[in-house]
Image (cartoon, grey):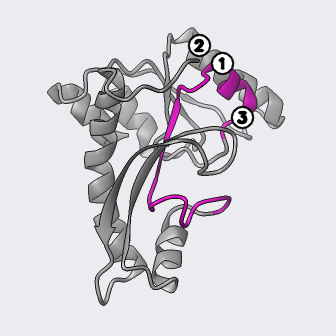
């Protein structure tokens, strides 16, 4: 999220962040959004124990703040059907591997990089895709490879992939904002 806010601040990404919805009440993203003047909300199973109520609260919060599309950046839950229905072809996610490899339920953070190393992959990378209701499944919008080097640990590989994420996500979001990448009809 910080890389996106930085790209907006420098004019590299011409977009207006409307609201941050975070499912982790302790996430630094809440402070970072507030520091950037972006309204920040904590909505999670703690605030809404019923999954349908949480999904509805998220859809309502995004709509009431005037969001045109949804950018997932560190959101560690499956996006619900109400949000997807409210923002058809307008929910974008980033994944730290070259999908469809090493994606799916439970594949996040170090788990992805551990799987890459265990699989003996020569390269991994970053994928930006539309969210369609299945884990890491929607239409791929952009990918960038990252080599796997001899002696990589999951932590070292994660850091190298993160550098690519911080570059590729804002670039891809700008390509969406400018119309270069068409998300399709809502």
Give how far apart the Cα atoms at labels 1 and 3 are: 10 Å
Mark with earlier residue (3, 2):
2
Figure quadrant of residue 4: top left
Q: In which quarter of the image is the N terminus?
A: top left
Q: Are marks 1 and 2 in contact (CB under 8 Å)?
A: yes
Mark with earlier residue (1, 3):
3
- Residue 77, above or below 92: below
Let me know if residue 22 is in the magenta part. no
Question: Callout 1: helix, strand or loop?
Answer: helix
Give how far apart the Cα atoms at labels 1 and 2 are: 8 Å
Mark with earlier residue (1, 2):
2
Residue drawn where x is 18% and y is 30% of the image: 12
Q: Nearer the viewer, residue 153 or 172?
A: 172
Residue 72 point in image, percent of width and height: 50, 38
Circle 3 crowding by C-alpha within 10 Å: few under 14, some 14–19, many from 20? some
Let me know if residue 81 is in the magenta part. yes
Residue drawn where x is 66% and y is 16% of the image: 60
Q: Along the horizontal axis of the image, is 59 left or right of 174?
A: right
Residue drawn where x is 59% and y is 63% of the image: 107
Residue 179 point in image, percent of width and height: 34, 21
Q: Are marks 3 and 2 in contact (CB under 8 Å)?
A: no
Figure quadrant of residue 9: top left
What's the magenta region?
79-106
Question: Callout 3: helix, strand or loop?
Answer: loop
For disc 2, the marked residue is 63
Q: Along the horizontal axis of the image, is 86 left or right of 74?
A: right
Image disc number at residue 80: 3
For disc 1, the marked residue is 86
Q: Quadrant of the C terminus?
A: top right
């Amino acid at each position: 999220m910080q890389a996106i806010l930085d790209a907006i601040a420098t004019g590299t990404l011409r977009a207006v962040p409307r609201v941050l919805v975070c499912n982790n009440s302790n996430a630094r993203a809440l402070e970072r959004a507030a520091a950037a003047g972006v309204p920040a909300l904590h909505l999670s199973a703690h605030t809404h124990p019923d999954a349908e109520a949480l999904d509805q609260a998220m859809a309502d919060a995004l709509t009431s703040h005037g969001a045109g599309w949804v950018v997932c950046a560190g959101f560690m839950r499956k996006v619900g059907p109400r949000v997807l229905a409210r923002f058809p072809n307008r929910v974008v996610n980033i994944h730290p591997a070259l999908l469809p490899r090493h994606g799916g339920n439970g594949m996040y953070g170090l788990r992805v990089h551990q799987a890459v190393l265990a699989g003996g992959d020569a390269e991994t990378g970053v994928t930006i895709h539309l969210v369609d209701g299945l884990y890491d499944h929607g239409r791929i919008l952009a990918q960038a490879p990252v080599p796997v080097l001899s002696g990589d640990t999951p932590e070292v590989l994660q850091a190298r992939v993160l550098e690519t994420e911080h570059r590729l996500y804002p670039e891809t979001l700008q390509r969406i904002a400018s119309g270069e990448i068409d998300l399709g009809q809502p």
